[in-house]
Image (cartoon, helix red, strand yellow):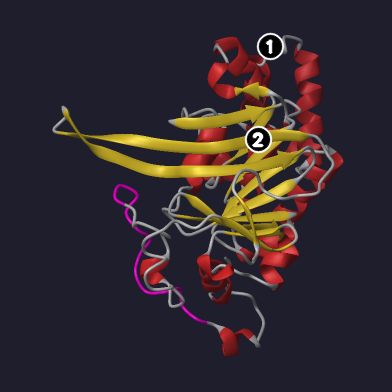
Amino acid sequence: MVSTVQTRDVNNDTRKVLLSIDDLHVWFELRRFGFGRAGYVKAVDGVTFDVHQGEAIAVVGESGCGKSSLMKTILALYKPTKGKVIFDDKDLAELDGKGLHLYHSHVGYVQQDPYGALPPFMNVQRILEEPLIIGGIKDKEERNQRIRKAMDEVKLTPVEDFLEKFPHMLSGGQQQRVVIARAMIMGPKFLVADEPVSMLDASVRVEILKLLRGLQESHNLSVIYITHDLSTVSYFSERIFVMYAGNLVEKANVRQVLDHPLHPYTMALLTGTSEPDAKNAETFKELPPGEPPSLVNPPTGCRFHPRCSKAIKGLCEVKEPSDFEPEPGHLVACWLYQ
């Protein structure tokens, strides 16, 4: 019998736990004509994991699986319906306005669309100065020094050539470097990167991922990398959490997931990955037919069973699987490994 793990992810990392997600549920109430309750959108439905100091993890899955709702709850933009988000031993739900302001100074956010994330009426200097002013840095010289240091770290050099430019004067890669500089300028402990390369040309994606990885290592940052593209996670992450229909279905280190995926959904994601390797022509498969299930009325049992060719009749459609551990540190929510 394979061991079953029901509470925390298995990881022998001895570093301090910086972020702890415990049985997190994020449900959005639906109203009928603005009055009667019509149900809930169960965007995140029982997610548990830890992120250690200095660790980079990736949360991967199709659009509509709950990644963005998870991310916005971690950023304290949404409140949990149930469960806890603990950052540096503090429950985010218990923080007041001052506590949330301090929390946001410790967390950087890199958006998916750099052009949409940058105010078009501000130049680079003003964009990077704004979080410093909000953060209470009153000395103008200190602000200028921080701006130059941040721009130098993201390779926007010579600095003087970029300070007076507006977003429309920059390339997509340069815009994303400004977004990263803004996320780093307050000296965060933790970074959330929401598909940071999906809007960029293929030629600059690896550069941006390597830049983020370098910043993560040099500043000992904890990072959550949100993506639907498994081909990029090996450049950046130490562990992968695979998300489907509001649940985490597989959790393991990068090499375990990429070399030996266990959940049928993870296998489907990997076989559909667009890696520039001629051998992939022999193994490439489309994702299983159908769409991710409705988060208002998700399927009973395993939520992937309507699309799964390996579903066990009489079990998968009836009973939701626990996390099983077929190999050390590799957790999978699938009845194939009971």
Q: Residue furthest left?
A: 33
Mark 1 and mark 2: Cα distance apart in space: 28 Å
Describe the element under mark 1 as helix, strand or loop. Answer: loop
Q: Quadrant of the C terminus?
A: bottom right
Q: Position of residue 2 (x, y in %)?
A: 65, 64
Q: Is residue 251 magenta?
A: no
The correct choice, above or below, for 261 with respect to 223 in the image is below
Closer to us: 174 or 77: 77
Q: Are marks 1 and 2 in contact (CB under 8 Å)?
A: no
Q: Position of residue 7 (x, y in %)?
A: 61, 43
Badge 1 amino acid: Gly
The correct choice, above or below, for 25 with respect to 326 in the image is above
Q: Which mark is residue 20?
A: 2
Q: Main secondary structure of the magenta part?
A: loop
Q: Position of residue 134 (x, y in %)?
A: 62, 16
Q: Magenta part of the protein: which range?
A: 285-297
Closer to us: 246 or 109: 246
Give the residue pinned by disc 1.
136
Q: Is residue 291 magenta?
A: yes
Q: Residue furthest front?
A: 1
Q: Quadrant of residue 17?
A: top right
Describe the element under mark 2 as helix, strand or loop. Answer: strand
Residue 119 in view, yes or no: no
